[in-house]
Amino acid sequence: MLAQRIITAVVLLVLIVPSIFFAPIWIWGLVSLLMLCAAGFEWGRLLGSVRAGAALGALLAILGAAYIAWRGEVPVPPPPALVAVLCAVSLVFWVSIGPMSLSRVHQVGPGWAIGALVLSACWVALYELRIESSAFLVSAMAIVWLADIGAYFSGRSLGRHKLAPRVSPGKTWEGVAGGVVAVLACAAALAQWLPDAADRIFSSHLASHLGWPVAALVLATIAVISVVGDLYESLLKRLAGVKDSGRTLPGHGGVLDRIDALIPTMPGCLLLLQLLR
């Protein structure tokens, strides 16, 4: 299992890192679209229909390819209004209906439509953030990774109070707090080490426009919303009676398992950048 995880991780890095930093932007668009289409297929399958999953994946592929052809790679201030609306609607779901769904473990509502909304918003955000710059994209995604790492270690060492025991018994409030602390600590360290990085580091960009107290609140909110995405995917898996969303990534499970926390957060990050122009 460990060998599988390492090999899969290396293959993913070989595909993803060059597409973000060295390849034309449309290459990243296609690579990320492939991941989101796979996640769409897994989403539909978790809802109990392989056919629905295939349809969702195909829909994302068609819309994504059309968007790449239409949008291109040139930054346009501000991004198209449609993008802002899509990201805003997705964010509203993740701060309202998404959390409420976690208390109703027996249902998730119109899951196919929700999947189409949040997965398409996530992909558009990933593409638009890459158009902004590779550094903006990676530093925005790093918020989610840091929150996850901080939550893991603090939850293991300090976790006592369960966050959502009926959905994900392993997650604790202490873990969430640890994730927030990790994000804020790294943002402060980056600001100290790279004081002139506001034009390329997401957290520093927020601080330069909003001031550190407000930026810290925003970063903490992003970390918390990432947990909602993780829990929502856990809810889908629990309803489906499976441990992983799929077997696409040997040793890691499905694509959805790896990007569940990015799905709710990336549209919010893009929306923030748009508002701060």
Image (tube, rainbow, N blue to C red):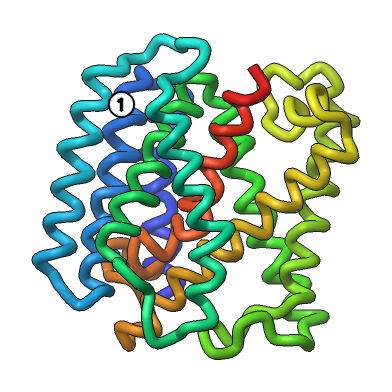
Secondary structure state at the residue bearing disc 1: helix
Quarter-of-image position of residue 71: top left
Instruction: Kindly identify the residue that appears in the image at 20 percent across and 30 percent down.
Output: 65
Quadrant placement of the N terminus: bottom left
Instruction: Kindly identify the residue that appears in the image at 64 percent across and 61 percent down.
Output: 148
Q: In this view, does 175 lie above or below 163?
A: above
* Position in image of residue 236 (x %, y %): 37, 75
**Number of residue marks:** 1
* Position in image of residue 265 (x %, y %): 55, 48
Q: Nearer the viewer, residue 6 or 276?
A: 276
The residue that mark 1 highlights is: 27
Residue 184 appears in view: yes
* Position in image of residue 218 (x %, y %): 74, 44
Instruction: Report whether 189 appears left or right of 75.
Output: right
Instruction: Report whether 92 appears left or right of 117.
Output: right
Which kind of residue does numbered mark 1 sit on? Ile
Residue 39 appears in view: no
Badge 1 density bin: few <14, some 14–19, many ≥20, Cα 10 Å? some
Q: In this view, does 153 lie above or below 31?
A: below
* Position in image of residue 60 (x %, y %): 22, 44
